[in-house]
Image: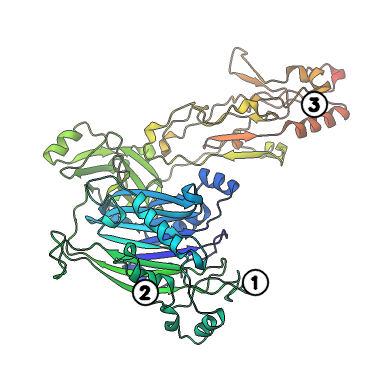
Amino acid sequence: ITVVTWNVGTAMPPNDVTSLLHLNTGETNDVDMIAIGLQEVNSKINKRLKDALFTDQWSELFMDVLSPFHFILVSTVRMQGVILLVFAKYYHLPFLQDIQTDCTRTGLGGYWGNKGGVSVRLSIFGHMVCFLNCHLPAHLEKAEQRKEDFATILHMQQFEGRVANGILDHDLVFWFGDLNFRIESLDICFVKYAIDSNVLSQLWEKDQLNIAKSTWPVLRGFQEGPLNFPPTFKFDVGTNKYDSSAKKRKPAWTDRILWKIKSPSTGLEASGRRPSRGVLSVSQLCYCSHMEYTVSDHKPVAAIFAVQFTSKVDKPPVEIYVADEWSRPEQAVVRYKMAVGFHRSSWDWIGLYRVGFRHPKDYVSYVWARSDDGERCLEKQLCAQVMFSEEALPKGNGEYILAYYSNTSSSIAGVTEPFQISLPRSEEGSSPTDSSGSSSEEDDSTLVLLAPKSRSPSPGKMKRHRSRSPSLAKFQGLILRPSSWDRGMSRSPSPQSRRGLPRDIPTIHVPQKELGQAANSPEGSSFYQTVQEHGGPRCVSTDSPLARADPRNLGLLPALRLEMIDQALGRRHENMDQGYYPCRRMSPTSPPGSRTSPKEGCSP
Protein backbone atom coordinates (compact mmCIF):
# COMPACT_ATOMS: atom_id res chain seq x y z
CA ILE A 1 0.00 0.00 0.00
CA THR A 2 1.38 3.39 -1.03
CA VAL A 3 0.26 6.44 0.97
CA VAL A 4 0.89 10.01 -0.25
CA THR A 5 0.19 13.32 1.49
CA TRP A 6 0.63 16.76 -0.05
CA ASN A 7 -0.46 20.26 0.92
CA VAL A 8 -0.73 21.72 -2.58
CA GLY A 9 -1.24 25.33 -1.45
CA THR A 10 -4.11 26.02 -3.94
CA ALA A 11 -1.67 25.41 -6.81
CA MET A 12 -2.51 23.90 -10.18
CA PRO A 13 -1.41 20.28 -10.65
CA PRO A 14 2.06 19.67 -12.10
CA ASN A 15 2.44 17.98 -15.46
CA ASP A 16 3.96 14.78 -14.09
CA VAL A 17 3.46 12.91 -10.81
CA THR A 18 4.99 9.57 -11.75
CA SER A 19 7.94 9.93 -9.39
CA LEU A 20 5.65 10.95 -6.53
CA LEU A 21 3.62 7.76 -6.97
CA HIS A 22 6.79 5.69 -7.53
CA LEU A 23 5.51 4.66 -10.94
CA ASN A 24 8.92 4.87 -12.55
CA THR A 25 10.35 2.09 -10.42
CA GLY A 26 9.85 -1.64 -10.20
CA GLU A 27 7.97 -1.13 -6.93
CA THR A 28 4.79 -0.33 -8.88
CA ASN A 29 4.34 -3.94 -9.93
CA ASP A 30 4.02 -4.96 -6.30
CA VAL A 31 1.76 -2.11 -5.14
CA ASP A 32 -1.87 -3.15 -4.78
CA MET A 33 -3.43 0.05 -3.42
CA ILE A 34 -2.62 3.77 -3.37
CA ALA A 35 -4.14 6.33 -0.97
CA ILE A 36 -3.59 10.01 -1.80
CA GLY A 37 -4.39 12.77 0.69
CA LEU A 38 -4.39 16.41 -0.47
CA GLN A 39 -4.81 19.57 1.55
CA GLU A 40 -5.49 23.17 0.52
CA VAL A 41 -6.86 22.29 -2.90
CA ASN A 42 -8.27 25.47 -4.41
CA SER A 43 -11.79 25.76 -2.98
CA LYS A 44 -12.80 29.29 -3.90
CA ILE A 45 -16.45 29.58 -4.86
CA ASN A 46 -15.85 29.56 -8.62
CA LYS A 47 -13.61 26.50 -8.36
CA ARG A 48 -16.02 24.68 -6.07
CA LEU A 49 -18.90 25.29 -8.48
CA LYS A 50 -16.84 23.96 -11.36
CA ASP A 51 -15.65 20.96 -9.34
CA ALA A 52 -19.26 20.23 -8.38
CA LEU A 53 -20.12 19.84 -12.07
CA PHE A 54 -16.89 18.21 -13.18
CA THR A 55 -14.15 16.22 -11.51
CA ASP A 56 -11.51 18.46 -9.95
CA GLN A 57 -8.20 18.77 -11.79
CA TRP A 58 -6.15 16.97 -9.15
CA SER A 59 -8.39 13.90 -9.18
CA GLU A 60 -8.40 13.90 -12.98
CA LEU A 61 -4.60 14.02 -13.00
CA PHE A 62 -4.19 11.06 -10.67
CA MET A 63 -6.80 8.98 -12.52
CA ASP A 64 -5.13 9.71 -15.85
CA VAL A 65 -1.70 8.80 -14.53
CA LEU A 66 -2.75 5.63 -12.66
CA SER A 67 -5.21 4.06 -15.10
CA PRO A 68 -2.50 2.81 -17.51
CA PHE A 69 -1.06 0.92 -14.53
CA HIS A 70 -4.49 -0.75 -13.98
CA PHE A 71 -5.32 1.29 -10.87
CA ILE A 72 -9.02 2.10 -10.50
CA LEU A 73 -10.51 4.79 -8.28
CA VAL A 74 -12.23 2.89 -5.46
CA SER A 75 -13.55 5.83 -3.43
CA THR A 76 -13.03 9.54 -2.94
CA VAL A 77 -14.22 12.13 -0.42
CA ARG A 78 -13.76 15.90 -0.34
CA MET A 79 -14.30 18.54 2.35
CA GLN A 80 -13.54 21.94 0.83
CA GLY A 81 -9.78 21.82 0.17
CA VAL A 82 -9.17 18.42 1.82
CA ILE A 83 -9.40 15.47 -0.60
CA LEU A 84 -8.79 11.76 -0.16
CA LEU A 85 -8.56 9.32 -3.08
CA VAL A 86 -8.13 5.55 -2.78
CA PHE A 87 -7.05 3.48 -5.80
CA ALA A 88 -6.61 -0.28 -6.24
CA LYS A 89 -5.66 -2.70 -8.99
CA TYR A 90 -8.79 -3.71 -10.91
CA TYR A 91 -8.54 -7.40 -9.98
CA HIS A 92 -8.73 -6.52 -6.27
CA LEU A 93 -12.03 -4.63 -6.61
CA PRO A 94 -14.36 -7.56 -5.75
CA PHE A 95 -12.47 -8.03 -2.47
CA LEU A 96 -12.87 -4.37 -1.42
CA GLN A 97 -16.28 -4.18 0.20
CA ASP A 98 -18.19 -2.20 2.83
CA ILE A 99 -16.79 1.08 1.49
CA GLN A 100 -17.83 4.14 3.49
CA THR A 101 -16.61 7.73 3.77
CA ASP A 102 -16.91 10.42 6.43
CA CYS A 103 -15.65 13.94 7.10
CA THR A 104 -15.37 16.19 10.16
CA ARG A 105 -14.99 19.97 10.12
CA THR A 106 -12.93 21.56 12.88
CA GLY A 107 -12.30 25.04 11.46
CA LEU A 108 -14.11 27.96 13.15
CA GLY A 109 -15.34 25.78 15.97
CA GLY A 110 -16.54 23.02 13.69
CA TYR A 111 -18.44 25.19 11.20
CA TRP A 112 -15.75 25.51 8.52
CA GLY A 113 -14.06 22.73 6.57
CA ASN A 114 -10.70 24.34 5.88
CA LYS A 115 -9.42 22.22 8.76
CA GLY A 116 -10.54 18.76 9.83
CA GLY A 117 -10.38 15.21 8.55
CA VAL A 118 -11.81 13.02 5.78
CA SER A 119 -11.74 9.24 5.79
CA VAL A 120 -12.38 6.20 3.61
CA ARG A 121 -12.92 2.90 5.34
CA LEU A 122 -13.30 -0.47 3.64
CA SER A 123 -12.91 -4.20 4.07
CA ILE A 124 -9.79 -5.48 2.32
CA PHE A 125 -9.91 -9.26 1.91
CA GLY A 126 -12.10 -9.41 5.00
CA HIS A 127 -9.99 -7.07 7.18
CA MET A 128 -11.18 -3.59 8.15
CA VAL A 129 -8.82 -0.77 7.11
CA CYS A 130 -9.31 2.99 7.48
CA PHE A 131 -7.49 5.81 5.68
CA LEU A 132 -7.67 9.17 7.49
CA ASN A 133 -6.44 12.39 5.87
CA CYS A 134 -6.25 15.40 8.23
CA HIS A 135 -5.40 19.08 8.07
CA LEU A 136 -4.82 20.30 11.63
CA PRO A 137 -4.36 23.86 12.99
CA ALA A 138 -1.15 25.68 12.14
CA HIS A 139 1.48 27.55 14.21
CA LEU A 140 3.93 26.44 16.88
CA GLU A 141 1.77 27.36 19.88
CA LYS A 142 -1.31 25.43 18.66
CA ALA A 143 -0.08 21.95 19.66
CA GLU A 144 -2.81 21.52 22.25
CA GLN A 145 -5.43 22.60 19.71
CA ARG A 146 -4.12 19.97 17.30
CA LYS A 147 -4.56 17.30 19.95
CA GLU A 148 -8.13 18.41 20.65
CA ASP A 149 -9.04 18.50 16.96
CA PHE A 150 -7.65 15.03 16.35
CA ALA A 151 -9.59 13.69 19.34
CA THR A 152 -12.74 15.36 17.95
CA ILE A 153 -12.23 13.72 14.56
CA LEU A 154 -11.81 10.28 16.16
CA HIS A 155 -14.93 10.81 18.24
CA MET A 156 -17.18 12.26 15.54
CA GLN A 157 -16.51 9.86 12.69
CA GLN A 158 -18.74 6.81 12.98
CA PHE A 159 -19.51 4.18 10.35
CA GLU A 160 -22.45 1.88 9.80
CA GLY A 161 -22.24 -1.87 10.20
CA ARG A 162 -21.68 -4.53 12.81
CA VAL A 163 -17.92 -4.07 13.08
CA ALA A 164 -15.47 -1.17 13.13
CA ASN A 165 -17.92 1.63 13.89
CA GLY A 166 -15.17 4.02 15.01
CA ILE A 167 -11.85 4.82 13.37
CA LEU A 168 -9.78 3.09 16.04
CA ASP A 169 -12.01 -0.01 15.84
CA HIS A 170 -10.46 -0.92 12.48
CA ASP A 171 -7.80 -3.59 12.20
CA LEU A 172 -5.45 -1.08 10.58
CA VAL A 173 -5.54 2.73 10.47
CA PHE A 174 -3.39 4.97 8.27
CA TRP A 175 -3.29 8.56 9.59
CA PHE A 176 -1.65 11.15 7.38
CA GLY A 177 -1.90 14.74 6.15
CA ASP A 178 -0.67 18.21 6.98
CA LEU A 179 -0.62 17.63 10.73
CA ASN A 180 1.20 20.94 11.28
CA PHE A 181 3.43 19.78 14.16
CA ARG A 182 6.52 22.01 14.56
CA ILE A 183 10.01 21.90 16.09
CA GLU A 184 10.13 23.34 19.59
CA SER A 185 12.87 25.21 21.50
CA LEU A 186 15.51 25.27 18.79
CA ASP A 187 16.05 28.52 16.91
CA ILE A 188 15.86 28.76 13.12
CA CYS A 189 19.63 29.07 12.69
CA PHE A 190 20.32 25.76 14.43
CA VAL A 191 17.49 24.04 12.56
CA LYS A 192 18.89 25.15 9.21
CA TYR A 193 22.40 24.15 10.29
CA ALA A 194 21.19 20.64 11.18
CA ILE A 195 19.46 20.38 7.80
CA ASP A 196 22.48 21.59 5.84
CA SER A 197 24.79 19.30 7.84
CA ASN A 198 22.41 16.34 7.45
CA VAL A 199 22.23 15.73 11.20
CA LEU A 200 18.45 15.53 11.29
CA SER A 201 18.46 13.28 14.35
CA GLN A 202 19.30 16.31 16.48
CA LEU A 203 15.87 17.73 15.60
CA TRP A 204 13.79 14.61 16.26
CA GLU A 205 13.55 14.94 20.02
CA LYS A 206 12.19 18.49 19.68
CA ASP A 207 9.56 17.52 17.14
CA GLN A 208 6.11 18.09 18.66
CA LEU A 209 4.59 14.93 17.20
CA ASN A 210 7.41 12.76 18.53
CA ILE A 211 6.86 14.30 21.96
CA ALA A 212 3.08 13.86 21.72
CA LYS A 213 3.30 10.16 20.80
CA SER A 214 4.77 9.43 24.21
CA THR A 215 2.58 11.82 26.23
CA TRP A 216 -0.85 11.99 24.59
CA PRO A 217 -3.15 9.01 25.29
CA VAL A 218 -5.02 9.63 22.03
CA LEU A 219 -1.83 8.82 20.07
CA ARG A 220 -1.00 5.65 21.94
CA GLY A 221 -0.18 2.85 19.50
CA PHE A 222 0.51 5.07 16.45
CA GLN A 223 3.80 4.32 14.73
CA GLU A 224 5.96 6.28 12.31
CA GLY A 225 9.14 5.56 10.41
CA PRO A 226 12.34 7.59 10.96
CA LEU A 227 12.37 11.14 9.58
CA ASN A 228 15.38 10.72 7.34
CA PHE A 229 14.26 13.42 4.92
CA PRO A 230 14.52 17.22 5.41
CA PRO A 231 11.57 19.13 6.89
CA THR A 232 8.88 19.61 4.26
CA PHE A 233 7.72 23.12 5.25
CA LYS A 234 8.07 26.03 4.50
CA PHE A 235 9.62 26.65 1.07
CA ASP A 236 9.58 29.56 -1.33
CA VAL A 237 7.19 28.48 -4.10
CA GLY A 238 9.04 27.40 -7.20
CA THR A 239 12.29 26.68 -5.34
CA ASN A 240 13.92 24.32 -2.87
CA LYS A 241 14.85 27.20 -0.55
CA TYR A 242 13.27 27.54 2.87
CA ASP A 243 11.13 30.58 3.65
CA SER A 244 12.99 33.79 2.84
CA SER A 245 10.07 36.13 3.46
CA ALA A 246 9.92 38.60 6.31
CA LYS A 247 8.22 35.99 8.51
CA LYS A 248 11.09 33.48 8.04
CA ARG A 249 9.14 30.53 9.35
CA LYS A 250 11.17 27.78 10.98
CA PRO A 251 11.39 24.57 8.88
CA ALA A 252 9.26 21.72 10.24
CA TRP A 253 8.04 18.21 9.44
CA THR A 254 4.39 19.21 9.08
CA ASP A 255 3.50 16.50 6.55
CA ARG A 256 3.44 13.04 8.14
CA ILE A 257 2.26 9.46 7.62
CA LEU A 258 1.53 7.19 10.60
CA TRP A 259 -0.21 3.86 11.11
CA LYS A 260 -1.79 1.93 13.94
CA ILE A 261 -2.61 -1.77 14.30
CA LYS A 262 -5.59 -2.61 16.46
CA SER A 263 -4.55 -3.75 19.92
CA PRO A 264 -4.95 -7.48 20.68
CA SER A 265 -7.69 -8.61 23.01
CA THR A 266 -7.03 -8.75 26.73
CA GLY A 267 -4.97 -11.73 27.74
CA LEU A 268 -3.40 -12.17 24.32
CA GLU A 269 -1.23 -9.05 24.37
CA ALA A 270 1.83 -10.84 25.68
CA SER A 271 1.73 -13.50 22.98
CA GLY A 272 1.04 -11.01 20.26
CA ARG A 273 -1.80 -13.15 18.90
CA ARG A 274 -5.29 -12.03 17.95
CA PRO A 275 -8.37 -14.22 18.11
CA SER A 276 -9.78 -15.58 14.85
CA ARG A 277 -8.00 -13.10 12.60
CA GLY A 278 -4.42 -14.12 13.23
CA VAL A 279 -1.47 -11.76 13.21
CA LEU A 280 -1.54 -8.59 11.12
CA SER A 281 1.91 -7.18 10.39
CA VAL A 282 2.90 -3.90 8.78
CA SER A 283 6.38 -3.08 7.49
CA GLN A 284 7.31 0.34 6.16
CA LEU A 285 9.44 -0.09 3.05
CA CYS A 286 9.88 3.57 2.17
CA TYR A 287 9.30 6.95 3.84
CA CYS A 288 10.54 9.98 1.92
CA SER A 289 9.80 13.46 0.65
CA HIS A 290 9.95 14.58 -2.97
CA MET A 291 11.96 17.74 -3.37
CA GLU A 292 11.45 17.86 -7.14
CA TYR A 293 7.92 19.28 -6.76
CA THR A 294 7.98 23.05 -6.25
CA VAL A 295 4.41 24.20 -7.02
CA SER A 296 3.62 24.53 -3.29
CA ASP A 297 5.34 25.75 -0.15
CA HIS A 298 5.09 22.14 1.11
CA LYS A 299 6.94 19.12 -0.26
CA PRO A 300 4.89 15.94 -0.79
CA VAL A 301 5.63 12.89 1.36
CA ALA A 302 5.16 9.25 0.34
CA ALA A 303 5.40 5.94 2.18
CA ILE A 304 5.13 2.35 0.98
CA PHE A 305 3.87 -0.36 3.34
CA ALA A 306 3.83 -4.13 3.14
CA VAL A 307 0.71 -5.39 4.94
CA GLN A 308 0.49 -9.10 5.64
CA PHE A 309 -2.60 -11.01 6.75
CA THR A 310 -2.64 -14.60 7.86
CA SER A 311 -5.98 -15.17 6.15
CA LYS A 312 -8.01 -13.54 3.44
CA VAL A 313 -11.29 -13.85 1.59
CA ASP A 314 -10.33 -15.36 -1.76
CA LYS A 315 -13.74 -15.88 -3.39
CA PRO A 316 -15.48 -12.84 -4.90
CA PRO A 317 -19.18 -12.16 -4.24
CA VAL A 318 -19.91 -12.68 -7.95
CA GLU A 319 -17.99 -14.90 -10.37
CA ILE A 320 -18.29 -13.98 -14.07
CA TYR A 321 -17.66 -16.42 -16.92
CA VAL A 322 -17.04 -15.22 -20.47
CA ALA A 323 -15.43 -16.51 -23.67
CA ASP A 324 -11.84 -15.60 -24.45
CA GLU A 325 -12.91 -13.63 -27.51
CA TRP A 326 -16.06 -12.11 -28.97
CA SER A 327 -15.73 -12.13 -32.74
CA ARG A 328 -19.47 -12.32 -33.44
CA PRO A 329 -22.36 -10.56 -31.68
CA GLU A 330 -23.98 -13.85 -30.70
CA GLN A 331 -20.91 -14.66 -28.60
CA ALA A 332 -21.59 -11.72 -26.26
CA VAL A 333 -23.06 -13.98 -23.58
CA VAL A 334 -22.23 -13.42 -19.93
CA ARG A 335 -22.75 -16.06 -17.27
CA TYR A 336 -22.38 -15.18 -13.61
CA LYS A 337 -22.75 -16.94 -10.29
CA MET A 338 -23.54 -15.17 -7.01
CA ALA A 339 -22.07 -16.35 -3.72
CA VAL A 340 -24.25 -17.44 -0.82
CA GLY A 341 -25.38 -14.41 1.18
CA PHE A 342 -24.87 -11.96 -1.68
CA HIS A 343 -27.52 -9.22 -1.62
CA ARG A 344 -28.59 -8.86 -5.23
CA SER A 345 -30.74 -6.01 -6.47
CA SER A 346 -32.86 -5.47 -9.55
CA TRP A 347 -30.67 -2.40 -10.18
CA ASP A 348 -27.44 -4.41 -10.41
CA TRP A 349 -25.75 -4.28 -13.79
CA ILE A 350 -22.79 -5.71 -15.68
CA GLY A 351 -20.53 -3.16 -17.33
CA LEU A 352 -18.19 -3.58 -20.26
CA TYR A 353 -14.93 -1.66 -19.71
CA ARG A 354 -11.89 -1.01 -21.83
CA VAL A 355 -8.66 -2.18 -20.24
CA GLY A 356 -7.29 0.89 -18.48
CA PHE A 357 -10.65 2.27 -17.30
CA ARG A 358 -10.46 4.86 -14.52
CA HIS A 359 -13.44 4.26 -12.21
CA PRO A 360 -16.52 2.01 -11.98
CA LYS A 361 -18.68 4.46 -13.94
CA ASP A 362 -16.22 4.64 -16.83
CA TYR A 363 -17.91 1.86 -18.83
CA VAL A 364 -18.39 1.46 -22.57
CA SER A 365 -21.81 -0.18 -22.28
CA TYR A 366 -23.79 -2.22 -19.80
CA VAL A 367 -26.57 -4.76 -19.47
CA TRP A 368 -28.95 -5.17 -16.53
CA ALA A 369 -28.26 -8.20 -14.35
CA ARG A 370 -31.96 -9.03 -14.32
CA SER A 371 -32.14 -12.68 -15.12
CA ASP A 372 -35.68 -14.05 -14.91
CA ASP A 373 -34.51 -16.84 -12.64
CA GLY A 374 -32.04 -14.71 -10.66
CA GLU A 375 -33.47 -15.59 -7.26
CA ARG A 376 -33.54 -19.29 -8.07
CA CYS A 377 -29.95 -19.14 -9.33
CA LEU A 378 -28.86 -17.44 -6.11
CA GLU A 379 -30.71 -19.92 -3.92
CA LYS A 380 -29.49 -23.03 -5.75
CA GLN A 381 -26.05 -21.63 -6.64
CA LEU A 382 -26.69 -21.84 -10.38
CA CYS A 383 -25.32 -19.60 -13.11
CA ALA A 384 -27.51 -16.82 -14.43
CA GLN A 385 -27.09 -15.53 -17.97
CA VAL A 386 -27.46 -12.21 -19.78
CA MET A 387 -26.48 -11.06 -23.26
CA PHE A 388 -25.23 -7.81 -24.74
CA SER A 389 -27.13 -6.57 -27.77
CA GLU A 390 -25.24 -6.04 -31.00
CA GLU A 391 -25.78 -2.28 -30.83
CA ALA A 392 -24.16 -2.15 -27.38
CA LEU A 393 -20.93 -3.81 -28.47
CA PRO A 394 -17.88 -1.74 -29.47
CA LYS A 395 -16.67 -2.20 -33.02
CA GLY A 396 -13.09 -2.96 -33.92
CA ASN A 397 -10.41 -4.77 -31.95
CA GLY A 398 -9.51 -4.23 -28.32
CA GLU A 399 -9.12 -5.68 -24.84
CA TYR A 400 -12.05 -5.39 -22.45
CA ILE A 401 -13.11 -6.37 -18.95
CA LEU A 402 -16.55 -7.24 -17.59
CA ALA A 403 -17.49 -6.16 -14.07
CA TYR A 404 -20.60 -6.79 -11.98
CA TYR A 405 -21.70 -3.60 -10.20
CA SER A 406 -23.69 -4.09 -7.01
CA ASN A 407 -26.20 -1.31 -6.39
CA THR A 408 -26.59 -2.38 -2.76
CA SER A 409 -22.93 -1.94 -1.88
CA SER A 410 -22.16 0.68 -4.58
CA SER A 411 -19.07 -1.26 -5.56
CA ILE A 412 -17.85 -3.83 -8.04
CA ALA A 413 -18.58 -7.37 -6.86
CA GLY A 414 -16.94 -9.36 -9.64
CA VAL A 415 -14.55 -8.88 -12.58
CA THR A 416 -13.16 -10.96 -15.41
CA GLU A 417 -9.69 -11.21 -16.79
CA PRO A 418 -9.14 -9.13 -19.96
CA PHE A 419 -10.62 -10.69 -23.10
CA GLN A 420 -10.63 -9.74 -26.76
CA ILE A 421 -13.45 -8.18 -28.77
CA SER A 422 -12.95 -8.32 -32.54
CA LEU A 423 -16.03 -7.09 -34.35
CA PRO A 424 -16.04 -5.59 -37.86
CA ARG A 425 -16.46 -1.86 -38.01
CA SER A 426 -19.71 -0.67 -39.55
CA GLU A 427 -19.45 1.36 -42.74
CA GLU A 428 -20.18 4.95 -41.90
CA GLY A 429 -21.80 6.64 -44.86
CA SER A 430 -21.67 10.37 -45.14
CA SER A 431 -24.95 12.23 -45.06
CA PRO A 432 -25.81 14.40 -48.10
CA THR A 433 -26.59 17.22 -45.71
CA ASP A 434 -23.08 17.18 -44.23
CA SER A 435 -21.71 20.17 -46.04
CA SER A 436 -19.16 22.65 -44.87
CA GLY A 437 -20.99 25.63 -46.34
CA SER A 438 -23.16 26.38 -43.35
CA SER A 439 -20.31 26.23 -40.86
CA SER A 440 -19.01 29.55 -42.11
CA GLU A 441 -22.31 31.18 -41.17
CA GLU A 442 -21.89 30.38 -37.48
CA ASP A 443 -20.99 33.29 -35.26
CA ASP A 444 -17.59 32.88 -33.64
CA SER A 445 -19.03 34.15 -30.37
CA THR A 446 -21.53 31.30 -30.14
CA LEU A 447 -21.10 29.29 -26.94
CA VAL A 448 -22.04 25.63 -27.00
CA LEU A 449 -22.20 23.83 -23.66
CA LEU A 450 -22.09 20.05 -23.94
CA ALA A 451 -23.11 18.03 -20.92
CA PRO A 452 -20.86 15.04 -20.18
CA LYS A 453 -22.04 11.53 -20.88
CA SER A 454 -24.17 10.04 -18.19
CA ARG A 455 -22.20 7.49 -16.22
CA SER A 456 -24.78 6.79 -13.57
CA PRO A 457 -24.38 3.38 -11.90
CA SER A 458 -28.14 3.01 -12.22
CA PRO A 459 -28.82 4.11 -15.80
CA GLY A 460 -32.48 3.20 -15.61
CA LYS A 461 -33.14 5.82 -12.95
CA MET A 462 -32.63 8.68 -15.38
CA LYS A 463 -35.83 10.61 -16.09
CA ARG A 464 -36.80 12.34 -19.30
CA HIS A 465 -37.76 15.97 -19.62
CA ARG A 466 -36.97 16.70 -15.98
CA SER A 467 -35.06 19.96 -15.95
CA ARG A 468 -32.95 20.71 -12.89
CA SER A 469 -32.04 24.22 -14.04
CA PRO A 470 -33.93 27.25 -12.67
CA SER A 471 -36.37 28.50 -15.34
CA LEU A 472 -34.03 29.13 -18.23
CA ALA A 473 -36.66 31.29 -19.94
CA LYS A 474 -36.00 34.01 -17.37
CA PHE A 475 -32.48 34.56 -18.66
CA GLN A 476 -32.80 37.42 -21.10
CA GLY A 477 -31.05 37.30 -24.42
CA LEU A 478 -30.69 33.52 -24.72
CA ILE A 479 -31.73 31.20 -27.51
CA LEU A 480 -32.44 27.69 -26.33
CA ARG A 481 -31.97 24.87 -28.78
CA PRO A 482 -33.41 21.44 -27.96
CA SER A 483 -31.32 18.90 -26.10
CA SER A 484 -30.70 15.42 -27.41
CA TRP A 485 -33.31 14.01 -25.01
CA ASP A 486 -35.94 16.29 -26.59
CA ARG A 487 -34.89 14.93 -29.96
CA GLY A 488 -35.90 11.44 -28.96
CA MET A 489 -32.70 9.90 -27.67
CA SER A 490 -32.86 6.88 -25.41
CA ARG A 491 -32.16 7.35 -21.72
CA SER A 492 -29.47 4.72 -21.89
CA PRO A 493 -25.90 6.03 -22.20
CA SER A 494 -24.91 2.89 -24.06
CA PRO A 495 -24.17 3.01 -27.81
CA GLN A 496 -27.46 1.40 -28.83
CA SER A 497 -29.25 4.56 -27.78
CA ARG A 498 -27.71 6.65 -30.55
CA ARG A 499 -30.38 7.18 -33.14
CA GLY A 500 -30.69 9.46 -36.12
CA LEU A 501 -31.65 13.05 -35.58
CA PRO A 502 -35.02 14.36 -36.76
CA ARG A 503 -34.80 16.38 -39.93
CA ASP A 504 -36.87 19.26 -38.54
CA ILE A 505 -35.41 20.86 -35.48
CA PRO A 506 -37.46 23.63 -33.85
CA THR A 507 -35.81 26.47 -32.03
CA ILE A 508 -37.17 28.45 -29.07
CA HIS A 509 -36.25 32.10 -29.11
CA VAL A 510 -36.16 34.10 -25.88
CA PRO A 511 -36.04 37.84 -26.74
CA GLN A 512 -33.61 39.88 -24.69
CA LYS A 513 -35.85 42.95 -24.53
CA GLU A 514 -38.31 44.89 -26.56
CA LEU A 515 -36.71 44.99 -29.96
CA GLY A 516 -37.83 48.57 -30.79
CA GLN A 517 -37.79 49.31 -34.45
CA ALA A 518 -36.60 45.84 -35.30
CA ALA A 519 -39.62 44.34 -33.54
CA ASN A 520 -41.99 46.62 -35.43
CA SER A 521 -40.42 45.87 -38.78
CA PRO A 522 -41.93 43.19 -41.06
CA GLU A 523 -39.27 40.69 -40.11
CA GLY A 524 -39.44 41.53 -36.40
CA SER A 525 -43.18 40.98 -36.29
CA SER A 526 -42.72 37.23 -36.73
CA PHE A 527 -39.64 36.93 -34.57
CA TYR A 528 -40.57 33.58 -33.10
CA GLN A 529 -39.97 30.56 -35.28
CA THR A 530 -43.05 28.73 -36.54
CA VAL A 531 -43.58 25.20 -37.76
CA GLN A 532 -45.80 24.84 -40.83
CA GLU A 533 -47.32 21.85 -42.54
CA HIS A 534 -47.42 21.88 -46.35
CA GLY A 535 -49.13 18.61 -46.96
CA GLY A 536 -45.88 16.77 -47.12
CA PRO A 537 -42.81 16.84 -44.96
CA ARG A 538 -42.75 19.47 -42.24
CA CYS A 539 -40.93 22.69 -43.06
CA VAL A 540 -39.43 24.92 -40.41
CA SER A 541 -39.83 28.59 -41.18
CA THR A 542 -37.13 30.72 -39.58
CA ASP A 543 -37.48 34.46 -39.51
CA SER A 544 -34.14 35.17 -37.98
CA PRO A 545 -30.61 34.43 -39.13
CA LEU A 546 -29.98 33.19 -35.60
CA ALA A 547 -32.13 30.13 -36.13
CA ARG A 548 -29.81 27.96 -38.15
CA ALA A 549 -30.62 24.34 -37.40
CA ASP A 550 -27.75 22.47 -38.99
CA PRO A 551 -27.68 18.80 -37.95
CA ARG A 552 -23.88 18.84 -38.20
CA ASN A 553 -23.77 21.18 -35.23
CA LEU A 554 -26.05 19.11 -33.02
CA GLY A 555 -24.06 16.44 -31.18
CA LEU A 556 -25.32 13.20 -29.75
CA LEU A 557 -24.76 14.45 -26.21
CA PRO A 558 -27.34 16.54 -24.35
CA ALA A 559 -26.55 20.13 -25.32
CA LEU A 560 -27.62 23.63 -24.33
CA ARG A 561 -26.82 26.21 -26.97
CA LEU A 562 -26.48 29.83 -25.80
CA GLU A 563 -26.40 32.82 -28.14
CA MET A 564 -26.62 36.51 -27.34
CA ILE A 565 -29.23 38.27 -29.49
CA ASP A 566 -27.71 41.75 -29.49
CA GLN A 567 -24.74 40.80 -31.66
CA ALA A 568 -26.87 38.97 -34.17
CA LEU A 569 -29.34 41.86 -34.37
CA GLY A 570 -26.39 44.07 -35.15
CA ARG A 571 -25.62 41.87 -38.13
CA ARG A 572 -29.28 42.04 -39.14
CA HIS A 573 -29.29 45.84 -39.10
CA GLU A 574 -26.11 45.84 -41.19
CA ASN A 575 -27.91 43.72 -43.78
CA MET A 576 -30.87 46.08 -43.71
CA ASP A 577 -28.56 49.04 -44.28
CA GLN A 578 -27.13 47.28 -47.34
CA GLY A 579 -30.60 47.14 -48.88
CA TYR A 580 -31.56 43.49 -48.55
CA TYR A 581 -33.19 41.24 -46.00
CA PRO A 582 -32.24 37.65 -45.26
CA CYS A 583 -34.99 35.49 -46.65
CA ARG A 584 -36.47 32.49 -44.87
CA ARG A 585 -34.51 29.30 -44.40
CA MET A 586 -36.65 26.21 -44.72
CA SER A 587 -35.73 22.80 -43.27
CA PRO A 588 -32.05 21.83 -43.33
CA THR A 589 -32.60 19.78 -46.49
CA SER A 590 -34.61 22.38 -48.43
CA PRO A 591 -32.81 24.51 -51.02
CA PRO A 592 -31.73 27.88 -49.68
CA GLY A 593 -33.58 30.90 -50.96
CA SER A 594 -31.96 33.85 -52.62
CA ARG A 595 -31.62 37.24 -51.11
CA THR A 596 -34.39 39.56 -52.31
CA SER A 597 -34.83 43.19 -51.55
CA PRO A 598 -38.13 44.49 -50.15
CA LYS A 599 -38.81 46.21 -53.46
CA GLU A 600 -39.21 42.82 -55.12
CA GLY A 601 -42.00 41.90 -52.76
CA CYS A 602 -40.25 39.17 -50.78
CA SER A 603 -41.91 38.54 -47.45
CA PRO A 604 -39.07 38.16 -44.96
Q: Which residue is mark 1?
A: 245
- From the image, state whether disc 2 or disc 3 is nearer to you: 2
Tell me the mark number nearer the camera, choosing from 3 and 1.
Answer: 1
Q: Residues within 10 Å of mark 1 (few under 14, many from 20)?
A: few
User: Is residue 409 toward the left or the right of residue 287 in the image?
Assistant: left
Residue 152 relative to residue 114: left or right:
left
Q: Is residue 598 above or below residue 93?
A: above
Please indicate, yes or no, whether residue 72 appears anywhere in the rendered image: no
Q: CA distance from mark 3 to mark 1?
A: 69 Å
Alpha carbon distance from label 2 to label 1: 33 Å
Distance from label 2 to label 3 (Cα)?
Answer: 75 Å
The reply to whether discs 2 and 3 touch (Cβ–Cβ < 8 Å) is no
Residue 67 at what x, y percent from top left?
Answer: 41, 58
Q: Name the secondary structure under disc 1.
A: loop
Residue at label 2? 286
* Foreground pick, 233 / 99: 233
Residue in the foreground of this view, choosing between 360 and 299: 299
Closer to the camera in the image, 595 or 525: 525
Image quadrant holding the C terminus, namely: top right
**Few, some or many residues within 10 Å of mark 2 (<14, 14–19, 20+):** few
Q: State the image quarter where residue 145 is shown.
A: bottom left
Quarter of the figure with residue 201: bottom left
**Residue 196 at x, y percent in the picture:** 52, 85
Mark with earlier residue (3, 1): 1
Q: Nearer the viewer, mark 2 or mark 1?
A: 1
Which quadrant of the rendered structure holds the N terminus? bottom left
Res. 315 in view: yes
Label 2 is placed on what type of residue? Cys
Q: Which residue is mark 3?
A: 595
